[in-house]
């Protein structure tokens, strides 16, 4: 692009428009121009360089009633090509130029240059020769400007005009090359805005004539003070040159208004820009860019023409929606009982964070021992003795790091931390790219982001991975993606899903936002893995049908970044608070929350399950994970954050709790009966013992270690905050120590209890109480024992080297009968002797021991042990 010599610059007019949309445009009476006569060479040089043409110093203003023009929002122009002036002195005056090229409805070209000067904005319009219908070859530019409403020009006020005049007519200058040119200049306080215009060729003195529009039969339209922007990346992005780009997807919106706020508490925006559907749209993405965001602090969008999900009503024009890709969000009005929370995106970059020395633990899946918790409930109770501003926050969680280490866990699974509808709970998210503000120390967005990262860094420093539960299958009823493009984002026409605000997960734009969200949490927050709640709905197609190869699930499995994290499918459904069994496609990458483990262990310990089912769960659920994965892909649990907690699981079993598969051990609810209490304590130990000696990843639920209760309610909302005083009770002390022992046992005997692959047949033996084969399919048989054989080479090496690290065989027995069993242990390997490490029927502190109690050999030469009813035992062959 050639540059404009300062000596040839002409200025035809200055337009002063008000800062708000209610103010009128005040057009200056004074027209600045320089009448020069150029010779042919001067004109040729001027036009060859695409300079501003000289303007005839004459304006006429025409009110809307004197024309048949109707201004609307459908002006169409080409995407601008931004260019810079090359000469240094002119670069200081004219920083950037955007070029727009139109084709008229009669086939000729209209070129518009928008030049950003140091403070003002210059517009140069050049028209190639047109078929004119007048004798003097005159051409008139008929124009107006708008901001928040493209269907209505802002009023223009001349000293000689009527107060409601909204358009101006400006004549072109015809050059020697047959082109028409006109120049205008807008002062800085008048921008940003849109210039909308058409061409008129008068045919007689009464100003009537031919009106020429774009090839799309609409007004020509160009943005002033901002650019067309870019379609990628979606959301708010910042360039190195300081410019800010906005981009949002909406296929069905008729128009999109970008709203800016200078006060997050304000009800109405301070500035609105009705984005042109041709200049500011590429495909289904609406976009705009700005050199700066002025003094505004937050933004949102108003979309016109979209229909709300499940309704034939067009979205209200007054409703402002949150950018789905906003990285920092904040409430801009208080929540109400009808529409729920309302959020805006903050106009700022994410705060920087020092990740120096952060090393991801990168633990193998089989080594994981997981603790599931709710960030708020974990430390909000006054018994946590934390300061009020950090209790119930990410910072509070980090303060209680010692408890996690005492339990021996090396991974935490956080309930959803995305912004959510507080009336429904964390499993009904409103957004996917930021943590819940309430979880920050001050309740602010920035503090929530920083404290999340600090928490992750501290946990990593102590060898603990951070896994997130995420919900991408549905949203909250309000305040989420509703109103942006419901027919694209949400499932429609599927009755059982439509009422649940079910997302159309395998639709390209929804798949894109989910993948972008996951990558964001991995790169910006160093998250180590994700557990996908309601995972069975990830398999649904556009019409609700189940897909054999769901694109989203496959994309996550093979994503270069996400494939390095832990990805877990959890088919629990938040709406019904029940799990849903599904054959989940995995591509040897997806792990699963093992619901069958939970069901079968509960049934066995209440005496209603076959031994074969117990054996299958102990060995890593080969019926589910032998399809190319292995036991490490089985995340085992006996309780979760919905349903009955562990204490209630052995205390309540009314008819209304039939689906919980619980047993009250002889009396419903609280009791003082010693026999019942002892039985319940044994059952709690049994549940934990089986959880930790089974192949797979044990998942412990928050509060089970200290006897948290909901009074027999399985509802998620009845879960209470963690009571730290309960850890000091006799129950809390012994169960916490037992869990710590089991964790250390799994680490020490990882050769048998933490395996990525299934055990070989030669490494496991099954026994009845008298060394006979188990009665696998006998419903009345309640006893099962298994011997896990260590590799012979390992045992021989330890005997030879007199290693203090025992790696002998393990003998584990389970008695779910209401009577004792005399157990005959098999002969131990040569050079070793059986030691009892666990007997859940013994009193504390003797029911578990790291060193173990030796089993005395009987006179008959057999190793016998008396197991009480409803108990589990563990023996280890230790080198003598």
Image: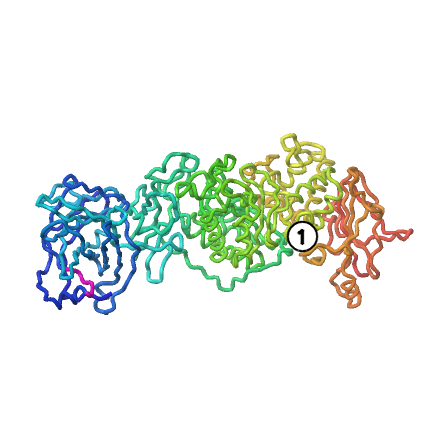
**Main secondary-structure element of the magenta-colored stretch:** loop
- 270 to the left or right of 357: left
The residue lying toward the viewer, choosing from 459 and 558, is 558
- 289 to the left or right of 663: left
Tell me if residue 383 can be seen.
Answer: no
State the quadrant of the N terminus.
Answer: bottom left
Instruction: Give above or below for 540 relative to 79.
Output: above
Q: Which quarter of the picture shows residue 598?
A: top right
What residue is pinned by disc 1? 631
State the quadrant of the C terminus.
Answer: bottom right
Residue lying furthest bottom in this view?
88
> What is the basis of the colouring in this image?
rainbow
Instruction: Give above or below for 792 relative to 448.
Output: below
The residue located at (43%, 39%) in the rendering is 478
Q: Please, what secondary structure does the residue beneath circle 1 have?
A: helix
Instruction: Give above or below for 670 relative to 19.
Output: above
Looking at the picture, how far across and down is residue 85, in whole percent? 25, 66
Looking at the picture, how far across and down is residue 103, in whole percent? 25, 53
Looking at the picture, how far across and down is residue 178, in whole percent? 15, 59
Looking at the picture, how far across and down is residue 541, in whole percent? 52, 43
Q: Which quarter of the picture shows residue 815?
A: top right
- Magenta span includes 50: yes
Magenta residues, as a range? 48-53
Residue lying furthest right in this view?
860
- Magenta span includes 574: no
């Amino acid at each position: 692009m050639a540059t404009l010599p300062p000596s040839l610059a002409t200025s035809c007019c200055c337009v002063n428009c008000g800062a708000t949309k209610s103010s009128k445009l005040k057009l200056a009476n004074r027209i600045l121009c320089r009448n020069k006569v150029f010779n042919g060479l001067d004109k040729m040089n001027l036009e060859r360089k695409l300079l501003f043409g000289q303007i005839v110093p004459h304006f006429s203003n025409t009110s809307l009633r004197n024309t048949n023009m109707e201004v609307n929002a459908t002006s169409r122009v080409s995407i601008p090509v931004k260019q810079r002036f090359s000469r240094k002195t002119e670069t200081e005056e004219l920083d950037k130029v955007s070029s727009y090229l139109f084709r008229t409805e009669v086939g000729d070209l209209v070129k518009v240059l928008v030049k950003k000067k140091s403070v003002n904005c210059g517009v140069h319009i050049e028209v190639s020769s047109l078929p004119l219908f007048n004798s003097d070859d005159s051409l008139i530019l008929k124009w107006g400007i708008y901001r928040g409403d493209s269907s209505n020009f802002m009023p223009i006020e001349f000293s000689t005009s009527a107060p409601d005049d909204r358009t101006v007519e400006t004549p072109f200058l015809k050059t020697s090359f047959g082109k028409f040119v006109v120049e205008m200049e807008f002062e800085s306080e008048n921008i940003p805005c849109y210039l909308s215009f058409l061409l008129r060729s008068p045919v007689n003195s009464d100003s009537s004539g031919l009106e020429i529009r774009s090839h799309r039969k609409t007004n020509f339209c160009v943005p002033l003070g901002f650019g067309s922007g870019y379609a990628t990346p979606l959301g708010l992005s910042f360039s190195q040159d300081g410019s800010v780009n906005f981009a949002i997807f909406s296929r069905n919106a008729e128009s999109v208004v970008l709203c800016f706020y200078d006060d997050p508490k304000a009800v109405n925006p301070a500035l609105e820009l009705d984005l042109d559907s041709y200049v500011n749209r590429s495909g289904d993405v609406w976009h705009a860019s700005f050199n700066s965001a002025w003094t505004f602090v937050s933004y949102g969008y108003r979309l016109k023409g979209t229909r709300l999900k499940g309704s034939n009503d067009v979205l209200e024009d007054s409703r402002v929606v949150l950018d789905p890709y906003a990285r920092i969000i904040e409430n801009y009005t208080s929540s109400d009982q009808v529409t729920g929370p309302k959020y805006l995106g903050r106009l700022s970059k994410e705060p920087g964070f020092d990740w120096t020395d952060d090393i991801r633990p990168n633990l193998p899946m089989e080594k994981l021992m997981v603790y599931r918790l709710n960030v708020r409930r974990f430390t909000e109770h006054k018994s946590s003795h934390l300061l009020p501003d950090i209790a119930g926050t990410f910072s509070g969680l980090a303060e209680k790091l010692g408890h996690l280490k005492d339990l021996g866990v090396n991974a935490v699974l956080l309930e959803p931390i995305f912004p959510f509808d507080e009336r429904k709970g964390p499993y009904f998210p409103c957004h996917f790219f930021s943590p819940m503000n309430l979880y920050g120390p001050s309740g602010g967005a920035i503090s929530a982001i920083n404290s999340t990262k600090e928490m992750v860094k501290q946990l990593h420093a102590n060898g603990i991975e951070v896994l997130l539960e995420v919900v991408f299958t549905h949203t909250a009823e309000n305040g989420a993606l509703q109103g942006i493009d419901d027919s694209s984002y949400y499932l429609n026409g599927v009755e059982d899903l439509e009422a649940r605000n079910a997302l159309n997960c395998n639709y390209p734009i929804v798949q894109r936002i989910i993948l972008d969200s996951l990558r964001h949490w991995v790169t910006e927050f160093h998250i180590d893995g994700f557990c996908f709640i309601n995972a069975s709905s990830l398999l649904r197609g556009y019409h609700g049908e189940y897909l054999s190869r769901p694109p989203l699930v496959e994309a996550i499995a093979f994503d270069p970044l996400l494939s390095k994290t832990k990805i877990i499918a959890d088919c629990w459904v938040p709406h019904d608070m029940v799990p849903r069994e599904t054959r989940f496609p995995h591509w040897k990458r997806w792990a699963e929350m093992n619901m069958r483990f939970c069901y079968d262990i509960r049934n066995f310990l209440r005496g209603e399950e076959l031994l074969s089912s117990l054996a299958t769960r102990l060995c890593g659920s080969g019926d589910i994970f032998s399809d190319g994965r292995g036991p490490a892909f089985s995340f085992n649990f006996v309780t979760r954050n919905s349903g009955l907690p562990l204490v209630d699981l052995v205390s309540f079993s009314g008819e209304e709790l039939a689906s919980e598969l619980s047993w009250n051990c002889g009396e419903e609810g609280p009791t003082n009966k010693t026999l019942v209490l002892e039985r319940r304590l044994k059952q709690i130990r049994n549940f934990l013992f089986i959880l930790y000696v089974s192949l797979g990843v044990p998942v412990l639920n928050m509060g089970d270690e200290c006897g948290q209760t909901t009074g027999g309610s399985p509802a998620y909302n009845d879960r209470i905050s963690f009571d730290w005083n309960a850890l000091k009770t006799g129950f809390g002390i012994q169960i916490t120590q037992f869990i710590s022992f089991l964790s250390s046992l799994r680490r020490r005997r990882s050769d048998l209890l933490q395996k990525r692959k299934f055990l070989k047949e030669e490494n496991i033996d099954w026994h009845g109480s008298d060394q006979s084969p188990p009665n696998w399919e006998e419903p009345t048989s309640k006893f099962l024992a298994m011997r896990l054989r260590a590799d012979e080479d390992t045992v021989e090496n330890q005997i030879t080297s007199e290693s203090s690290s025992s790696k002998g065989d393990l003998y584990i027995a389970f008695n779910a009968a209401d009577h004792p069993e005399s157990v005959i242990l098999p002969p131990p390997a040569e050079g070793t002797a059986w030691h009892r490490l666990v007997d859940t029927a013994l009193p504390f502190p003797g029911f578990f021991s790291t060193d173990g109690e030796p089993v005395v050999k009987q006179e008959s030469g057999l190793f016998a042990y008396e197991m009480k009813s409803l108990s589990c035992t563990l023996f280890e062959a230790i080198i003598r």
